[in-house]
Amino acid sequence: MSMKNNLEKVIITGGAGFIGSNLVNKLLENGTEQILIIDDLSTGKLNNLNNLSENGNIKFIEKRVEDIENLSETFKGFDFCFHLAAGVGVQYIMDNVSKALLTNIEGTHIVIEACKQNDIPVLITSTSEVYGVSEDPIWTEETKSLIGPPTKLRWSYAASKLIDEFLALSEYNDGNLKPIIVRLFNIIGPNQLSEYGMVVPKFVEAALNDNPITIHGSGIQTRSFTWVGDVVNYFYLLAKNELYGEIYNIGQTEEISISDLAKLIIQKCNSKSEIIFKDHLEVYGDKFEDPMRRTPSIDKIVNATSYEPSMSIPEMVEEIIRYKKINP
């Protein structure tokens, strides 16, 4: 595998967020010399970037990409762009539907333009949501999307991310852009906020305080979770290896039901929490639909990078509990 892009000078939009801040650390460990972070801190947090202040190699712009006067000028001289800025989390999306939609579409369009003008390759984060409620047992990159009707606003996020994918791949087809598209499944790890509907940090916080754990729906719906360290390793390897014009699932094939997840967290925390079930209708209203399971095929990315996810669900949960105890 020929490693070509040296990733010496890198842009990360959304670099103060959960995945972005973990990516910053990964790049610094691997010799990236200059990082430009663009983040409006709508869901990112500056203290995620604790090594920012003493590191002269990191420049931070607290803005949305859409609000930067001449983005193409700002991007000049960089080797790669990781475009992670987006509205995140089911709760956030449901509360800010039109804002999240426009951020995802306009922001990505502007980033693509700036990358085109400077001939900078770009990794664009898409989402497992694009598969919608597909009935296929395992979702490969070629699985047909089955997105719910527009009256179910939950699917606005998926639709906006599909537009991002089409924008990037059509520019690639015209020879104007070197994009890599990753579809992220549920990702967990340090620096993840619970207030945007992220299930694991939410459950862990409740369990550590012996508060009731609320499950939305029946609890039999399953999810697969991926460690954020594995995710940023994949980002790094895809960028290094210049695997342009392709879509990759990033996730884990091990599934767990939300009920079992709650029980596992209660057990690992030695918690007295009880489990309460709430109907989705009560939580998000009737604009919501929830897929019963969501499991990726990751054969494509494992073959491309020779890297396998490194942690099991119980290991990830233990690690998050340990982190939360130190950083309540």
Image (spheres, rainbow, N blue to C red):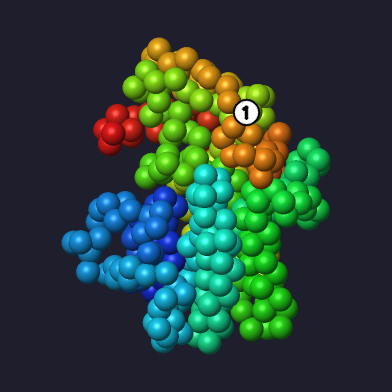
Left or right, 47 with respect to 191, comes to: left
User: At x 39% / y 74%, what residue is drawn?
Assistant: 9
Residue 101 visible? The answer is yes
Left or right, 13 with respect to 221, comes to: left
User: At x 42% / y 39%, what residue is drawn?
Assistant: 194
Compared to 273, does 182 lie above or below? below
User: Could you say which is closer to the camera, residue 151 or residue 41?
Assistant: 151
User: At x 53% / y 87%, what residue is drawn?
Assistant: 117
Q: Whole-percent x and y of residue 205?
A: 38, 29
Left or right, 61 with respect to 43, comes to: left
Q: Quadrant of the N terminus?
A: bottom right
Q: Count all numbered tags in the image, as a single digit.
A: 1
Residue 12 visible? The answer is no
Q: Whole-percent x and y of residue 237?
A: 53, 59
Q: Quadrant of the C terminus?
A: top left
Question: In which quadrant of the rendered view does residue 241 lie?
Answer: bottom right
Instruction: Kindly identify which residue carries mark 1.
Output: 279
Type of the residue with mark 1: Asp
Q: Whole-percent x and y of residue 268?
A: 43, 19
Question: In which quadrant of the rendered view does residue 78 lie?
Answer: bottom left
Left or right, 159 with respect to 229, comes to: right
User: Could you say which is closer to the camera, residue 174 or residue 156?
Assistant: 156
Q: Whole-percent x and y of residue 245?
A: 67, 70
User: Could you say which is closer to the camera, residue 184 or residue 245?
Assistant: 184
> Crowding at label 1, few (<14), some or many (≥20) Cα neighbours within 10 Å?
few
